[in-house]
């Protein structure tokens, strides 16, 4: 599998071996690491969780897209799940290619798409003792009709405004 | 295109039912609440149309209300009151007593909507005439309906026949069946009960925490993932709006309006954060 998950530390030496190719003149990798801050908060640890049945399919589609878009030899992406500490590696992407340019481009494409499309979620634990799911907590929408709550008698709401909001 | 607001009609006197139709229960939820939630899944804003005497009625007062503001009798008053209150939006006007109306039917109606017509409506499968109480009314219909009523007209169905309306064959023969009598209610209840099925739902991340479980098998009458999400928001109070989520059925991304089948495995996907 060219996209997979691991519960334990990513073995980059082994991963790199899988990308060896006699026709490849270069190899590029990207590592995502757990850092100690995000959006102004001090982070102490992370948890990653994935919907693996779909994530494996979507990850495989991304890898296949990279192979179709860029003339590269081999690609591999490994994402870690479970509890991670600061400086741990969360994700590894490797690409081997005839020339370095395509390898950089394909590597960038894979990590960008993985971040946006693969059903993986990250929970941050903060120094404050608080925690939160990234991208889910801050933008949690107010209930759709909350703007009407102030109208205790309801019926006035219809007549206060005569234009779409 | 101008936005579509929803107007659920609940001003009728329920004479034949001999009790208030809005408060009839289906699987523990009132007919009015079901219709309101259905409309809210498709419209930017939703109101319940009522007569002035009904504004304190508890089954109605929980919703944003739009009180009749033009004289007359019958549903034409509710339709015109909506168009008068927000003259620059189109209105999806729905009777509250259409227990088989589905997300798929509303998706289809709104997709096929012709903003240059006065209205877009379904044809009834019973008499092949337009069904005015599941119709998108465009702003231009306001003046035409006022003229029609001033000329003695009362029937929005006849109005749709005589004026420029886009008329659609319904996708589902039953979608517009309305419920007027105790016998019809009993039959609808039985049909909806026999319509229930078992689904497996898995929860991840924030939704797993809010549901307090990572999966469950549940019995539901929800016909689509959109309806199922509405039901589960009611049960678990999920804070994420449907617009923020994707949905997967049987481990593949799915449309929200896809019909669900017994045994399907459904996963709601909160905003992702890999890497």
Image (cartoon, rainbow, N blue to C red):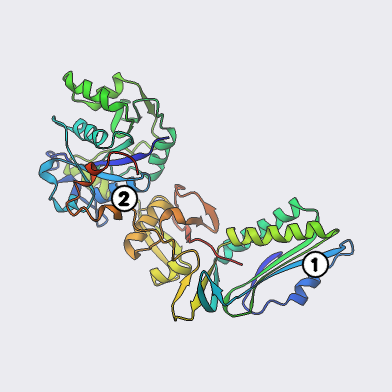
- The crowding category of the residue bearing disc 2, from other C-alpha atoms within 10 Å (few below 14, some 14 to 19, many at least 20), is some
> Element type at marker 1?
loop
- Quarter holding the C terminus of chain A is top left
B116 vs B96, left or right, is right
Residue B12 occupies which quadrant of the picture? top left
Secondary structure under tag 2 reads helix
Q: Nearer the viewer, residue B196 or B71?
A: B71
Chain holding disc 2: B
For the residues labelled 1 and 2, the Cα–Cα distance comes to 52 Å
Seen in the image, is B269 located left or right of residue B103? right
Q: Tag count in the figure?
A: 2
Q: Quadrant of the N terminus of chain A?
A: bottom right
What residue do we see at 44% from left, 36% from top?
Answer: B111
Give the left or right position of residue B45, taking residue B268 as reference.
left
B237 or B273: nearer the viewer: B273
The numbered disc on residue A19 is 1
Numbered badge on residue B209: none
Give the image quarter of residue B130: top left
- Residue B232 seen: yes
Rendering coords of residue A42 (x, y %): 52, 77
x then y, percent, for residue B227: 38, 52
Q: Which mark is residue B37?
A: 2
Residue B215 shows up from this direction: no
Question: Does residue A136 sit above or below B260 in this rendering?
Answer: below
Q: Nearer the viewer, residue A120 or B224?
A: A120
Give the residue at x 22% y 20%. B147
**Going 23% across and 55% down the picture, which residue do you hit?**
A150
User: Could you say which is closer to the camera, residue B2 or residue A72?
Assistant: B2
As drawn, the residue found furthest toward the right would be A22
Residue A77 in the image, given as x and y percentages of width and height: 69, 66
Q: Position of residue B172 (x, y in %)?
A: 38, 38
Question: Within 10 angstroms of label 1, few (less than 14), some, or many (20 or more) residues?
Answer: some
């Amino acid at each position: 599998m060219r996209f997979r998950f691991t519960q334990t530390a990513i073995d980059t030496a082994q991963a790199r071996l899988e990308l060896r190719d006699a026709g490849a003149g270069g190899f590029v990798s990207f590592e995502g690491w757990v850092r100690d801050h995000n959006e102004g908060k001090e982070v102490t640890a992370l948890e990653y969780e994935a919907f693996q049945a779909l994530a494996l399919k979507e990850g495989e589609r991304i890898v296949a897209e990279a192979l179709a878009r860029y003339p590269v030899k081999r690609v591999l992406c490994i994402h870690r799940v479970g509890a991670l500490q600061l400086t741990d590696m969360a994700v590894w992407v490797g690409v081997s290619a005839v020339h370095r340019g395509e390898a950089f481009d394909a590597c960038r494409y894979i990590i960008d798409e993985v971040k946006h499309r693969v059903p993986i979620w990250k929970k941050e634990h903060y120094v404050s003792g608080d925690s939160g799911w990234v991208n889910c907590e801050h933008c949690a929408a107010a209930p759709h009709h909350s703007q009407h709550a102030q109208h205790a008698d309801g019926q006035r709401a219809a007549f206060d405004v005569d234009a779409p909001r | 295109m101008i936005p579509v607001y929803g107007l659920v009609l609940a001003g009728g006197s329920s004479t034949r039912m001999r009790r208030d139709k809005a408060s009839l229960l289906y699987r523990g939820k009132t007919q009015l609440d079901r219709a309101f939630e259905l409309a809210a899944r498709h419209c930017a804003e939703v109101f319940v149309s009522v007569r002035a005497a009904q504004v304190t009625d508890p089954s109605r007062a929980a919703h944003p209300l739009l009180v009749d503001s033009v004289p007359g009798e019958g549903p034409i008053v509710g339709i015109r009151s909506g168009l008068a209150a927000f003259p620059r939006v189109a209105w999806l006007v729905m009777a509250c007593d259409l227990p088989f109306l589905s997300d798929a039917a509303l998706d289809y109606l709104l997709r096929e909507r012709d903003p240059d017509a006065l209205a877009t409506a379904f044809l009834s499968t019973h008499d092949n005439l337009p069904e005015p109480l599941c119709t998108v009314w465009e702003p231009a219909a306001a003046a035409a309906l006022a003229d029609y009523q001033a000329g003695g007209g009362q029937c929005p169905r006849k109005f749709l026949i005589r004026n420029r309306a886009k008329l659609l064959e319904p996708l589902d023969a039953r979608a517009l069946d309305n419920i007027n009598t105790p016998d019809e209610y009993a039959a609808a209840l039985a049909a909806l009960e026999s319509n229930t099925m078992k689904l497996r739902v898995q929860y991840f991340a924030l939704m797993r925490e809010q549901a307090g479980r990572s999966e469950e098998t549940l019995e539901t009458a929800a016909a689509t993932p959109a309806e199922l999400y509405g039901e589960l928001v009611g049960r678990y109070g999920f804070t994420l709006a449907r617009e923020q989520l994707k949905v997967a059925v049987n481990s593949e991304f799915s449309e929200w309006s896809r019909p669900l089948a017994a045994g399907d495995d459904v996963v709601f996907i909160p905003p992702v954060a890999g890497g």
